[in-house]
Amino acid sequence: MNKGKPGFLAGGLTLLAFVLLWQVASMLAPPATVPGPRELLERSITVYSEPDSYVVVWDTLRRIILGLTLSMIVGGIAGVMMGLHRHVEAFLDGWIMVLLTFPAICWAFVAVLTFGISDVGPVFTTVLIVFPFVALNVWEGTKAIDKEVIDMAKVYKANRHLIIRKVVVPQLMPYLFSSLRIALSLSWKIVLVGEAFAVGSGVGRMLLFHFQDTRVDLMLAWGVSFMVFMVLIDVLIFRSWERRAFRWRHQVAT
Amino acid sequence: MASTVVHVDKLTKKFPVPGGGEEFVVLDAVSLDVKEGEFASLVGPSGCGKSTLLNVIAGIEEENNGSVTVYPSAQSTDGTVHVGYVFQSARLLNWLTVEDNIRFALEAQDVPREQWRDRVGKYLDMVGLAGQEPNYPLNLSGGMQQRVAIARALAIEPDILLMDEPFSHLDEITARKMRIDLMEILERAKTTILFVTHDLREAVYLSDDVYMMSTKPARIFRHVKVDLSRPRHPEDPRLFDMEKELVQEFFAVVEQQSQ
């Protein structure tokens, strides 16, 4: 970990510098256009001292979890199938490319037209946008599986279940983890957009509401605090989970 | 008379050549028998189908013609055949500890769970890695990784242990130590071995029986018995003489084939 320290320090310092600069800019700009970090913090406290806000956050979180899970499942299966079977690869290759290039905003409109005002819209939009990324990643991972250890497992007459559990999945783990983190960073933003368009609840809805109200400060309070929340999930849950899963790589020789 | 563990009868194996055309014959009516408790080596130049023969015996490749039979030895307690395999590289599961790597083979072979702990301890000790159970393979040297692979193969208490140039990836000093240790291990484990190598010296030092293979045709052209008592000394002049003699035979065969 020592090797990364100067990088962390530089990252932290520039972030701090940015916050200071932002504070200065907000004090020079006309009020109500650029709220400063201090003001934002105050608004955030106001927002979260309201118990109803947690219901709003939970609504959004629920959609993110659902969209993320479905994206990982659909993308994971598609990726593995593409890696294993050449005709599936040929078939899905084109579809994945089309989905990757299709504008997100179009899906959001399609979702509104198809599902109306409901929970399904943002989740549907998320899955369609996120799963191709997951599939692409897992596809690469499946192609990179070491065939030699699979042969070893077959020589020892390991059954299919044992091979998948102890030989295949561990080799896919790095790809699954990077997929999961990409998927999280994409899906929360998509869910917010989807909520602004198609649902009468959630953080996205609050953003739209405060925007229409020209309360930039409250809008940013919701947006920035939610971003921080997502970063914390990534750092505290996903990264430490990843570190634990890859202990075998980092252990120092004894 | 010891009973036969592996019986290979006129085994032929062909591989299709990409783009069609005549098939490539890697094994051409190869026959050999390995008796219980015996150390047999198969020596030949690279690409003569030695590894393919092991793969057919291990059941991961199919024969085109002829037959391969593995019989349960006196060691087999459950009447089924257990085949151990040590590859050129260790082929360990790097994400599992040393102990779990051996347990993987035991689980795959349906060894009763209550025996796992004893077997892991016993065979790690035998290969000189006692106490390494909780370590991960990437923390071990190449030689130690190969020892884990040997312990994994021995732990299933195989009727036949197949070894495919297991020391060719190691430096000569380490390889030498491994050969000496392998002899000692086998004294204790009493395993039947079919060993593949391109190193005649290694073959005569380790084996009771040496089968020499040529490439075209891919056949066994000579079967030599090495009647030297054990333990053997790697510097034994009789081994050198034998090696010299067999190398000359190899050249004679190669010469004949090129004419």
Image (spheres, rainbow, N blue to C red):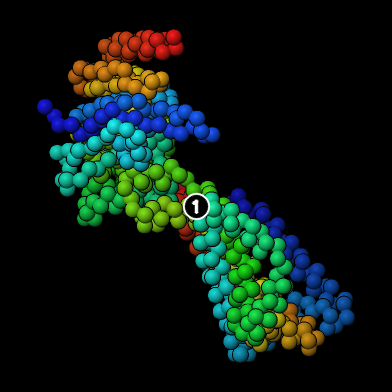
Query: Is label 1 in a helix, a strand or a loop?
Result: helix
Of A100 and A226, which appears nearest the observer?
A100
**Which residue lies most toward the front here?**
B21
Location of mark 1 (residue): A84
Q: Quadrant of residue B27?
A: top left
Q: Is residue B185 visible?
A: no
Query: Where is the C terminus of chain A found, in terms of image quarters?
Result: top left
B63 sits left or right of A251 in the view:
left
Q: Residue at x 22, y 54 (%)?
A: B112
Whether residue B46 sits left or right of residue B234 in the image: it is: right
Q: Position of residue B194 (x, y in %)?
A: 28, 30
Q: Type of residue at label 1?
A: Leu
Is residue A22 visible in the rendered structure shown here? yes
Image coordinates for residue A97, horizontal then vertical, percent: 66, 59
Image height of B183 relative to B86, above or below? above
Name the one closer to the observer, B237 or A192.
A192
Viewer-nearest residue: A136 or B221: B221
Q: Residue at x 40, y 10 (%)?
A: B256
Above/below status of A105 relative to B223: below
Q: Is residue B59 left or right of residue A11?
A: left
Task: Identify whether A122 is placed above or below B93.
Answer: below
Q: Is A84 on the left-hand or right-hand side of A99?
A: left
Q: Quadrant of residue A11?
A: bottom right
Q: Position of residue B216 (x, y in %)?
A: 41, 20
Position in image of residue A239 (x %, y %): 55, 62
